[in-house]
Amino acid sequence: MSVGSFETLGYSSDLGVIHPIRVQPETSEGINDSLTPISPGVARFRRGGSRRKFGNFARFITLSAPLGEATATTPYASARVYAKVTIFAKDVFDAISLGDEYTYQSVTFTVASKTPERIA
């Protein structure tokens, strides 16, 4: 659940053009600050929804953290919680590796996957 209404921020495509993108306010925290200024007359990027739909989709990482602690009788956590975070800048995305720790909303996650942008 979001902490507020959607915001329109700047997202840098792989080609370096700054596009508008609507995201929830918690997405734009930390090293993931939005880019400015937004280039005039460019297409909007999408953050969510089915990537089968037509349109430009932003790059993102999927984060994973165990829900509950491992014990002697349950050596693995029984469930995991996942979060998807849009990465506004390509150089930040490229610097993130699978297995890296990433703090999001005061919770330490592990980077489970990276999904590049898709331009239709």
Image (cartoon, helix red, strand yellow):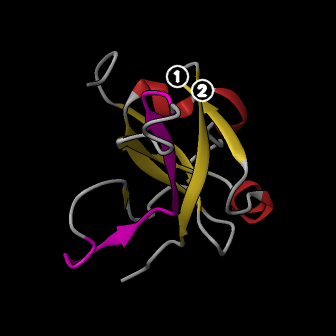
Confirm whether the magenta stretch covers residue 58: yes
Q: Amino acid at mark 1?
A: Gln
Q: What residue does disc 1 label?
A: 105
For the residues carrying marks 2 and 1, which lies nearer the camera in this image?
1
Residue drawn where x is 73% and y is 51% of the image: 100
The Cα–Cα distance between marks 2 and 1, rounded to whole angstroms, is 9 Å
Q: Quadrant of residue 22?
A: top left
Instruction: Name the disc covering residue 29, or none.
Output: 2
Determine crowd level at label 2: few under 14, some 14-19, many 20+ residues with C-alpha closer than 10 A: few
Give left or right: position of 34 versus 20.
right
Give left or right: position of 90 versus 112.
right
Q: Viewer-proximal residue, 72 or 54? A: 72
Confirm whether the magenta stretch covers residue 94: no
Residue drawn where x is 39% and y is 43% of the image: 80
Residue drawn where x is 21% and y is 67% of the image: 50
Q: Amino acid at mark 2?
A: Glu
Which quadrant is the N terminus positioned in? top left
Q: Viewer-proximal residue, 70 or 103? A: 70
Give left or right: position of 91 versus 58.
right
Residue 80 higher or lower than 27, as above or below: below
Instruction: Name the disc covering residue 50, or none.
Output: none
- The residues colored magenta run 51-70
Residue 9 appears in the figure? no
Horizontal and vertical percent position of residue 31: 72, 35
Do the CB atoms of the residues marked 2 and 1 lie less than 8 Å apart?
Answer: yes
Q: Quadrant of residue 55?
A: bottom left
Q: Which circle's residue, 2 or 1, is located before the other in the chain?
A: 2
Horizontal and vertical percent position of residue 13: 59, 66
